[in-house]
Image: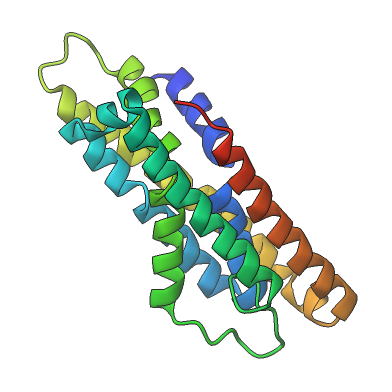
Amino acid sequence: MSPEFLFTSLIIVASPGTGAIYTIAAGLSSGRRASVVAAFACTLGILPHLMAAMLGLAAILHTSALAFNMVKYAGVAYLLYMAWHSLREKGALNIERAQDKRTDMRVIIDGILINMLNPKLSIFFVAFLPQFIDAHSENPMLQMLALSGVFMVMTFVIFALYGVFAATMREHVVSRPNVMAWLRRSFSAAFGALALKLVLTER
């Protein structure tokens, strides 16, 4: 496994995006457990993209403007939904001194959808990953699974670290209503900005 793959994957995973923001919001709203669950959910959201790449569906997203835009705008709609609910204190950033009443299943579903509806992840598995697969490999699918597994482990670990760090700051945030209001607006704006960025994304 090349250092270039590990370094590039680290940059991609660590860069602030929808999954990272969602995990941080989960840590702030519900604590360490929820942040780890959110990180796990975002990692699970990678699996459909991996399966699509292995089945050739990601290539369709890469070549078909209609298919790409359908997934893209579904992702935009969901990000706007998250922005709205964050702002209204009923979504990912419902910060109260009592624990957020959302179940683990709700956190998992939101996390999976956030990553599943990001078409750029499918393009990642089509355009980026194959560069690190040995052209002379006897089993390129197995090598692709191994690289994807490493990418997913990195995703889970880094997102969980983001969320746990946010969870450690939870008590400081909950005791300051002005900070809470500012954070809700900030996370809502962040989801909105990511939706706008996705709208401007080309294949």
Task: Mark yes or no: residue 40 visible.
Answer: no
Horizontal relation, residue 87 to residue 73: left or right: right
Question: Which residue is painted at 58% across and 71% down in the image?
Answer: 32
Quarter of the rendering containing residue 146: top left
For the N terminus, the quadrant is: top left
Quarter of the rendering containing residue 150: top left
Please state which of residues 76 and 116 is positioned toward the viewer in this rendering. 76
- Vertical comparison of 6 with 43: above or below: above
- Vertical comparison of 163 with 106: above or below: above
| Residue found at the very far bottom of the displayed protein | 98
| Residue found at the very far front of the displayed protein | 66
- Return the x and y of residue 141 as percentages of the image width and height: 16, 28
Question: Which residue is painted at 68% across and 76% down in the image?
Answer: 88
Quarter of the rendering containing residue 127: top left
- Vertical comparison of 85 with 195: above or below: below
| Residue found at the very far left of the displayed protein | 138
- Vertical comparison of 165 with 34: above or below: above
Question: Which residue is painted at 45% across and 67% down in the image?
Answer: 37
| Residue found at the very far top of the displayed protein | 136
For the C terminus, the quadrant is: top left
Question: Which residue is painted at 52% across and 72% down in the image?
Answer: 34
Task: Mark yes or no: residue 50 visible.
Answer: yes
- Return the x and y of residue 51 as percentages of the image width and height: 22, 41
- Return the x and y of residue 79 as percentages of the image width and height: 55, 56
